[in-house]
């Protein structure tokens, strides 16, 4: 199927972009890497999609769409521009420590291999009528990750502007914007340190041309800034790679530690209350309510275990995180390989069945005398079956080619190229003290599981389901599977 080949092409493209981001393949001097940051729902994926023209999945619900870091690229005046779509903090699907570890792992690999982040785009929805905990957390973490002396290469872009606001709404939004940009708790400090401010898609129109122009105007500004202001190293990169700190010793790690302690205390207090309530209910023989309390208790115990895991994660070094990531991606590659093999085997089995069916059909035709009109109909049916078998052969050939491409380009060239690039990064002198750091295997195949399942959902058997004839070898007859006429050729 073409689906299988297109999946491989897409995965290869993703892996190549990640190879550039992490320095496995050397980017050109004019290439630029910009982080896109912000809370979940601030419009990061939409911004990247408009700017690059790439098919970026967009979350329309309460849950985060971006599972990890995504890297997308586009050409701008002969230069390749990479936009790195980062996960937000205070996400519904992962803890802040998990998010921080993702950022530290990939940004550390990038820095170790000599790739610099040339600027940041911090998106903030102006539609939020109050500064939520999620917004504050994302601003706080952005400052801790960057730690710049000056923020010349930072853009704060407000999003979600309404398309037809009243004058009262305009006044409210402008006052809210002024507070965001002046108060040091929010963006005031970085604005004072030369960060610039944009209103993304200010007129709020759902017009793709206007949205694209607005997004590219912001990126064009950062490109100009990066040409005149050398990028500073992110504080998180400097601490993890250059100074050899554990994740918990970094400024960003310290920022999340306090909240982790508070969360753990809250869970422990809730657990004590639930245990006391369960004892009371059992004493009162209220077993139904006691069972419900037990379920709540199990949930809180799970949260406590997660808090303990997060606490242990804070003690991990860059090498620890890269080793974890290496094991995870090796296993993912094995899973992908098994899925491709299974899909290919299913296609080959289907083809063998179809060829056997066609062979039996021809033998049956040769043994059975027919009148002329029935012979012509049988010949037409034979030709249709022959066409389907040839189509199936073509699909199997494409599937085999796609699998070979997967093995050669993804598992072979890019996998081995990653290892070589990492070795070069380790010996380049970037890492302080000459301590080797094991950088992750950057095969960023975020959506492969879903895509393989999508491809597997349309195996070759669909061809038989769509055809009007299926040869029943037990009955030695051709059975129409659709249509009002049940013609049987005996």
Image (spheres, grey):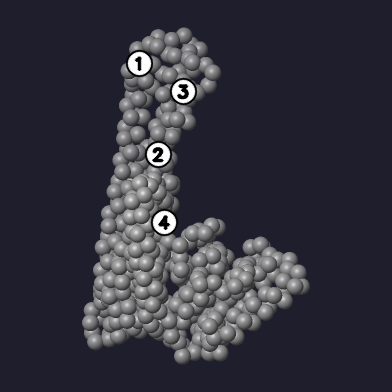
Vertical order, 390 against 15 (above or below): above
Residue 237 location, x and y as percent? 36, 80
Q: Earlier in the sequence, mark 2 or mark 1?
A: 2
Counting other residues with Cα less than 10 Å from the Cα at mark 4, is it few (<14), some (14-19), or many (20 or more)? some
Residue at (50% x, 23% y) in the render: 482
Disc 2: which residue: 459
Which sits earlier in the primary sequence, circle 1 or circle 3? 1
Q: Is residue 289 visible?
A: yes
Q: Along the polypeptide, which appears first: circle 2 or circle 4?
A: 4
Residue nearest the observer in this picture, 211 or 477 = 211
- What count of labels does the image hold? 4
Closer to the camera in the image, 400 or 236: 236
Q: Position of residue 145 (x, y in %)?
A: 42, 80
**Mark 1, residue position:** 476
Compared across the picture, whether 197 is left or right of 333 comes to right
Helix or strand or loop: what does disc 1 sit on? loop
Q: Is residue 322 left or right of residue 42?
A: left
Q: Which residue is mark 3?
A: 481
Q: CA distance from mark 2 to mark 3?
A: 18 Å
Q: Are the residues flagged by discs 1 and 4 in contact, CB closer than 8 Å?
A: no
Mark 3 element type: loop
Mark 2–mark 3 contact, CB under 8 Å?
no
* Residue lying at 36% horizontally and 41% vertically, measured from the top left: 396
Of discs 2 and 1, which sits in the foreground?
2
| Crowding near the residue tagged with mark 2, few <14, some 14–19, many ≥20 C-alpha atoms within 10 Å | some
> In the image, which is nearer the foreground, mark 2 or mark 4?
4
Q: CA distance from mark 1 to mark 3?
A: 15 Å
């Amino acid at each position: 199927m073409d689906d299988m080949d297109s999946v491989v092409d897409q995965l290869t493209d993703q892996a190549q972009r990640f190879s550039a981001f992490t320095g496995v393949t050397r980017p050109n001097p004019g290439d630029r890497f910009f982080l896109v940051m912000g809370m979940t729902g601030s419009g990061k994926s939409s911004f990247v999609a408009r700017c690059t023209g790439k098919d970026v999945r967009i979350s329309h619900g309460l849950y985060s769409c971006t599972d990890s870091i995504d890297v997308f690229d586009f050409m701008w005046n002969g230069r390749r521009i990479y936009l790195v779509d980062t996960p937000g903090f205070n996400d519904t699907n992962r803890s802040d420590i998990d998010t921080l570890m993702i950022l530290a792992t990939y940004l550390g690999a990038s820095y170790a291999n000599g790739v610099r982040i040339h600027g940041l785009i911090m998106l903030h929805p102006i539609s939020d009528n109050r500064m939520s905990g999620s917004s504050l957390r994302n601003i706080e973490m952005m400052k801790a990750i960057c730690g710049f002396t000056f923020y010349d290469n930072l853009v704060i872009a407000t999003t979600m502007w309404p398309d037809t606001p009243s004058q009262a709404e305009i006044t409210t939004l402008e006052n809210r914007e002024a507070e965001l940009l002046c108060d040091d708790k929010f963006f005031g400090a970085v604005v004072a340190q030369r960060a610039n401010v944009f209103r993304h898609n200010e007129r709020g129109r759902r017009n793709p041309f206007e949205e694209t122009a607005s997004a590219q105007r912001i990126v064009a500004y950062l490109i100009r800034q990066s040409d005149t202001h050398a990028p500073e190293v992110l504080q998180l990169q400097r601490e993890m790679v250059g100074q050899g700190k554990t994740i918990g010793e970094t400024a960003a790690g310290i920022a999340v530690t306090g909240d982790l302690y508070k969360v753990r205390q809250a869970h422990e207090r809730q657990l004590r209350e639930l245990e006391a309530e369960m004892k009371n209910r059992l004493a009162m023989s209220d077993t139904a309510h006691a069972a419900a309390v037990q379920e709540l208790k199990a949930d809180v115990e799970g949260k406590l275990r997660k808090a303990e895991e997060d606490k242990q994660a804070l003690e991990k070094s860059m090498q620890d995180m890269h080793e974890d990531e290496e094991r995870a991606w090796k296993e993912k590659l094995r899973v992908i390989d098994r899925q491709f093999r299974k899909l290919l085997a299913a296609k080959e089995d289907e083809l063998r069945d179809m060829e056997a069916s066609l062979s039996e059909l021809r033998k049956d035709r040769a043994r059975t005398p027919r009148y002329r009109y029935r012979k012509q109909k049988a010949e037409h049916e034979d030709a249709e079956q022959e066409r389907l078998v040839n189509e199936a052969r073509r699909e199997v050939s494409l599937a085999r080619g796609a699998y070979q491409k997967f093995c050669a380009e993804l598992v072979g060239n890019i996998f081995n190229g990653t290892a070589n690039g990492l070795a070069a990064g380790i010996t380049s002198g970037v890492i302080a003290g000459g301590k080797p750091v094991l950088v992750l295997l950057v095969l960023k195949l975020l959506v492969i599981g879903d895509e393989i399942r999508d491809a597997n959902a349309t195996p070759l058997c669909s061809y038989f389901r769509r055809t009007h004839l299926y040869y029943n070898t037990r009955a030695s007859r051709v059975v129409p599977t659709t249509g009002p006429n049940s013609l049987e050729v005996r």
